[in-house]
Image (cartoon, helix red, strand yellow):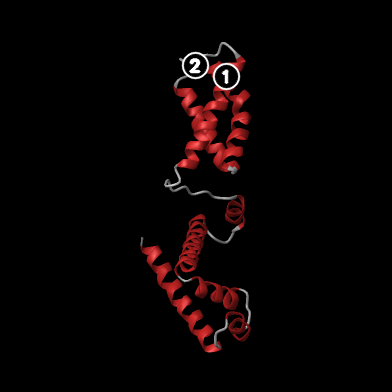
């Protein structure tokens, strides 16, 4: 298959591949990555690709995309970083900050998210109390009644959670 035929093949089956991959990985961005890998493979073997029938090509795209999408899901140990539309929009509308400062802000948000996830795994009660008091603004008296603790105990748990989160964020930033 020459380059012109390959380009026609690519244009014809790109959307098919993305649709199949999206059904498997449940993310449009990831589906496009999977499709890119599929067509990179096809490009590497384009000279050996059997283009004698549309049915064969369609079946080959379906087969390769399905396998590549499943491989992607199986390889959960591979760390993947995805930037979502709202992150991109946030970067685009920050006119007073440089791109570097915007990216650093996103990085700090990632560390904060990782720290909260760590607190939730380490001490679920402290996490829940911290969220209710600090994030939701519920009074310590009300939270104490909900959890069956004293107001002082709730305040201590919030303080411990704050200290733990700060230490965890500092640790993550050093890594």
> For residue 22, what is the image quadrant?
top right
Where does residue 108 sit, x and y in percent of width and height? 48, 63
Where does residue 170 sit, x and y in percent of width and height? 40, 68
Circle 2 is placed at which residue position?
A: 49
User: Which residue is at 63% across, 78% downward?
Assistant: 137
Of callouts 1 and 2, the N-terminal one: 2
- Camera-nearest residue between 168 and 149: 149
Where does residue 149 sit, x and y in percent of width and height? 55, 85
In the displayed structure, would residue 152 be above or below residue 164? below
Where does residue 143 sit, x and y in percent of width and height? 60, 81
Q: Of all residues shown, which one is farthest toward the front?
A: 148
- Image quadrant holding the C terminus, namely bottom left
Left or right: 137 in relation to 125: right
User: Which residue is at 48% across, 84% downward?
Assistant: 156
- Camera-nearest residue between 74 and 11: 74
Circle 1 is placed at which residue position?
A: 57
For the residues labelled 1 and 2, say whether their Cβ atoms are less than 8 Å apart: yes
Q: How crowded is mark 1: few (under 14 residues within 10 Å), some or many (20 or more)?
A: some
Estimate the spatial distance between the alpha carbons at disc 1 and disc 2, rounded to whole Å: 9 Å
Residue 42 showing in the rendered view: yes
User: Which residue is at 49% across, 32% downward?
Assistant: 37
- Camera-nearest residue between 100 and 164: 164
Q: Of all residues shown, which one is farthest toward the left?
A: 175
């Amino acid at each position: 298959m020459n380059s012109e035929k390959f380009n026609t093949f690519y244009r014809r089956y790109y959307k098919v591949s993305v649709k199949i991959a999206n059904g498997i990985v449940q993310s449009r961005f990831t589906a496009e990555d999977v499709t890119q890998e599929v067509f990179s493979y096809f490009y590497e073997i384009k000279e050996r690709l059997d283009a004698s029938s549309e049915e064969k090509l369609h079946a080959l795209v379906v087969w390769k995309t399905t396998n590549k999408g499943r491989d992607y899901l199986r390889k959960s140990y591979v760390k993947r970083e995805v930037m979502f539309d709202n992150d991109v929009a946030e970067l685009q509308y920050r006119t007073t900050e440089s791109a570097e400062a915007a990216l650093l802000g996103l990085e700090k948000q990632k560390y904060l998210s990782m720290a909260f996830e760590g607190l939730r795994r380490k001490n679920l009660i402290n996490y829940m109390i911290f969220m209710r008091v600090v994030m939701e603004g519920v009074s310590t008296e009300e939270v104490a009644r909900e959890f069956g603790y004293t107001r002082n105990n709730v305040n201590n748990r919030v303080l411990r959670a704050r200290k733990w989160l700060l230490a965890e964020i500092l640790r993550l930033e050093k890594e």
